[in-house]
Image: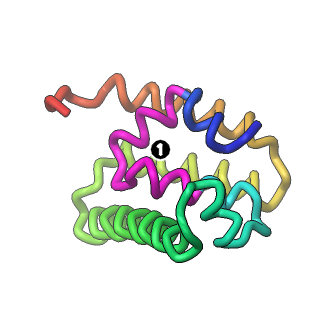
Amino acid sequence: MDAIRWAEKDKLAKVLLQKSHLSPENFKALLLYYWKRDTTFEELGKRLGVQRSGAWKRWRKGVDAILRSFYTIELGIYSGVLEPEVAEFLLQDLQDYLSLLKEGESASKIRDKIELRMLKMLRKEPKKGY
């Protein structure tokens, strides 16, 4: 399935995008770039309807947003303020992701596991008005 169609149809991806540091445009750039590893920024620009430099900027902003999230999690771990249950979910998700990359596990099987954990976590999340 095409990366953009997947993101538009997948309910959990939509929820996670809303709660993330990523803009929809930057997320699209990341999806298109990483789902087809040999994509050039010129090709990416054509798919996004921007020039090559605009495609690179969207990709770069997406990467930067993910790194900001990583540093936020690291700060939570380092300072001892990350909830143990969140740490457990992260650990399981990262182990599944590594299985996908190293052992060739099915992406859909990994997504199913992540969906179950995220639904469990989202049900426990207090309502905050956003």
Which one is nearer the viewer's eye here, 93 or 24?
24
64, 89: nearer the viewer: 64
Asked if the stretch drawn in magenta spans residue 44, the answer is no
Q: Nearer the viewer, residue 59 or 17?
A: 59
In which quarter of the view is residue 108 placed?
top right
Question: Which residue ends up furthest to the left in the rendered image?
Answer: 129
Other residues around mark 1 within 10 Å, as few (<14) / some (14–19) / many (≥20): some
For residue 12, side relative to residue 97 (left or right): left
| Highlighted range, magenta | 11-30
- Residue 5 position, x and y percent, is 64, 35
Q: Quadrant of the N terminus?
A: top right
Q: Position of residue 55 (x, y in %)?
A: 54, 67
Relative to 43, say whether 49 is above or below. above
Main SS, magenta region, reads helix
Task: Name which residue type carries label 1.
Answer: Phe
Q: Which residue is outermost to the right?
A: 104
Residue drawn at point x = 85 percent, y = 52 percent: 104
Vertical comparison of 128 with 74: above or below? above
Assign the C terminus to one quadrant of the image: top left
Q: Is residue 24 magenta?
A: yes
Q: How is the image coloured?
A: rainbow
Q: Secondary structure at mark 1?
A: helix
Residue 128: x and y in percent read: 15, 32
Look at mark 1 in the image and give the residue it sits on. 89
Question: Which residue occupies 70% across, 65% down?
Answer: 43
Residue 54: x and y, percent?
Answer: 49, 70
Query: Measured along the vertical axis of the image, is residue 56 above or below residue 81?
Result: below
